[in-house]
Structure formats: structure tokens, C-alpha cells
Amino acid sequence: MTLFERKLGALVEEAQGRGLLDSGTARSLAALAAERESRKGWLSLASVLAFLGGGVAVLGVILLVAANWQDLRGAVKIVGFLILLAATHAGGLWIQSSGRPFPKTAAAFHFLGAGLFLAGVGLISQIYQLNEHPPNAILMWLVAILPLAFLLRSPSIAAMAAFALVLWCHMEGSSVASSLHMSGFTPFLVMEIGLGAALLSLSAWMKVLDASICWVLRASGTLILSYGLWALGFYRRFHTGGSATEGGWILPGTALLLGFAGILAVRNAITPHAPGLRKYLVALLLSLLAICALALWLHPGSEANDFGLAENSVSAAAWILWFLLALWCVAVGARSGRKAYLNGGAAAVGLGVITRFFDLIGGMAETGTIFVIGGILLLATAWATEKWRRSIAAGMEDTKKCA
């Protein structure tokens, strides 16, 4: 018996005790719940098997073609690929149009087709020797699958498109032959943070069109921003790596501009469940992008790199922003009753404390004494953070009961 069935059983039993339900209705509700949970489980299992089966099928095709690669002509390879690509998407569309209750299987077919397109780009490139600039293959893949994410309302393809965008930016920036070539870690990190802000703002626009795609874009943007802000705290340690290159500011600069424009455009639509705290999130995100612009300006090769403590200021500002965003998540969780925000914020506070401890103190230790003291402090911080989180969660539960 699942957790949902146990909760429903307890609720139905209490309703019967109060005379709100008769025995026949109670049995019908229990049967309906069991049927629903059973169907949900089969769909979940079907989705796992569908994606696993798709992956195994692709691997099998790759091995089969690889074994006979030298004996196949170029036209045969391309025609075979087009048939396979069309068959995968046709299978997904047929399941959707026929009204069959297999949405996960249809999504797996479309996901497989979107992945196969990259294989087709590589196939054509191999046959006709088009390997002069590899990032172009990823760009073609991105352009091809991006419309599919919106036309098919596919969150999995949307996630694949977000991955393709970040991958292309990295490959284009890493290519020495590219006019957008970047040197050093800072431009890549700034570019990622800008893209994360752009994806987060785009998710607010997508909420009206498709909630599942909105969730994927919001999750992708949040993960990228979280990693970028955490890594930016170490700016004082990696700011000297690399040198400025002509055109090396174009990708990170464009990403920052997209992030700024996106956040400003959706400033009234972010976090609809906590409108009172919305302005603080917008201010924190814009501050993060401003700090990234400063870090890019201080990149080696710029005359501004002679300001002395500027790199330490960037790191310190990133640390402060990390804790402020964590506390914002805690505030949202406490005000809106969403435990995911509360738990995420408390975990971010703990991660920030641990990270900064090793960053500031670990490298200064000549003996093990400071690690003993630091370990005790970390244990005390962990205890205080968990007690703080539980007290807020208990308050949320009390508020729900009163309501």
C-alpha cells in the first residue's frame, strides 16, 4: 500500500466515523485510489523501460552499422538514417494522435528522434568530410531540436536543447579558429551565469504555454546559476588564468545582456507564489549579473586588473550573494509553505559555510589544531542550521493546521 493510499484510508475512516461517508462510498474511493496508483506505477515503469529501450535500440543500431560500415555506401547510410529518424518521430506522433494512454512512450520516441539528429549531423560530416569546425554540428543540432521542444510540448527535448546551447557556447569559445575564442576560466563562467539567468527568465514566459517546459527551463537556469555563483566565490584564486583575446568578450557579454534583459522583462512574473519577496530576488539576480560584468572587466589583459583588492571584492560579493539567496529561499519556504525552498535554502547555508571554511582557513593551517577547532565549529553550525530549519518547518505545519 502506497503512502497516498494510507493517507486516503485514514481520511476515509475518519469521515466514516463522523458520518460523512457511507461504507459503499468508502469502498469505491479505496478502489479508485488503488486503480490510480496502479496505473501511475505502470506508467512510471513504462517510462523507464521506454527510455531504456530507446537507448538500447540506438546502441544496437550503432554497433550494427559500425560492424558493416565499410561496406555501406554514403547514399545508403543517409537514407537509412532518414528512415530511422522519420520512424521514431512517426511512432511518437501516432501514439499521440491515436489517443493511446502511453504519453511517456511517445515522449521517449521524440526524445530518441531529437538525439538521433546529432548522429545524422555527424554522419553527413563524416561522409562528406565536413569536420573543419565541429561547433557548427552542435549549432545545427540546436537549431533543429529547439522548435521540436515547443511544437511537441516536450520537456525532455527542452532539456536537451538547453544542454545543446551551453555545449555549443563552450565549444565555440574553446575553438582557437573561432572569432569568439575565449581564454581562461572567467569568461566561460560569466557566460554560464548569463545563460542561467536567461533560461530562468524564459521559464516565466513559458509558464503560459507549457508548465512542464517551464519547470525544465527553471530547473536548468537555477542549477546553472547555483553552480556559477558558488564557483564565482573562488574568483580570487582563478582570475589570473588565461589572457584576454580579441572577441573573447562577445559570448559572455551577450549572455549577460540576455540575462539582464530577461530578468528585467519578467520582474513582475517571477515567483508568483511569493510576490512580496519578488523584488528582493530580482535585486539579487541583477546584482549577480553586475558582479559578473565586473569580473569580466577585470579579466587578465585589461588595464583594470591593477586595482589590487578588486578580485577579492568580487569573491566576497559572491559569498554574500550566496548567503542572501539562501536566506531568500528560506523566507519563501516559510511564507509560502513550500518545504523544498526551506530545505534548499538551509542546505545552501550549510554548503556555503563548509566551502568558505576550507577556502579561508584550510590553506592557512600549519598544524592540525585549527582543523580540530574548525571541525567543532562546523558541527555546531550544522546543529544550529538543522534546528533552525526544523523550527521553521514546525511553524509551517502549525500554520497549516490553524488554516
Image (cartoon, rainbow, N blue to C red):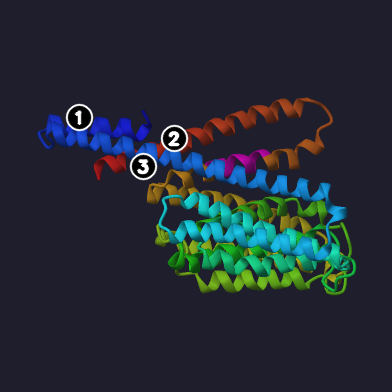
Residue 114's place in the image compared with 363, above or below, is below
Left or right of 108, for residue 101: left
Q: Amino acid at mark 3?
A: Met
Q: Which residue is mark 2?
A: 390
Dot 2: element: helix
Percent coordinates x, y for residue 78 in the rendering: 76, 64
Q: CA distance from mark 2 to mark 3?
A: 10 Å
Q: What residue sits 44% from the left and 61% below the top?
A: 97
Q: Which residue is mark 1?
A: 13
Dot 1: element: helix
Verify CB contact (< 8 Å) between mark 1 and mark 3: no
Residue situated in front as seen by the camera: 176 or 237: 176
Residues in magenta, as a range: 346-354
Dot 3: element: helix
Q: Which residue is mark 3?
A: 396
Q: Is tag 1's residue or tag 3's residue first in the polypeptide sequence? A: 1
Residue situated in front as seen by the camera: 302 or 147: 147
Residue situated in front as seen by the camera: 300 or 31: 31
Say if residue 69 shows up in the picture: yes
Residue 310's place in the image compared with 30, above or below, is below
Left or right of 98, for residue 315: right
Q: Is residue 353 magenta?
A: yes
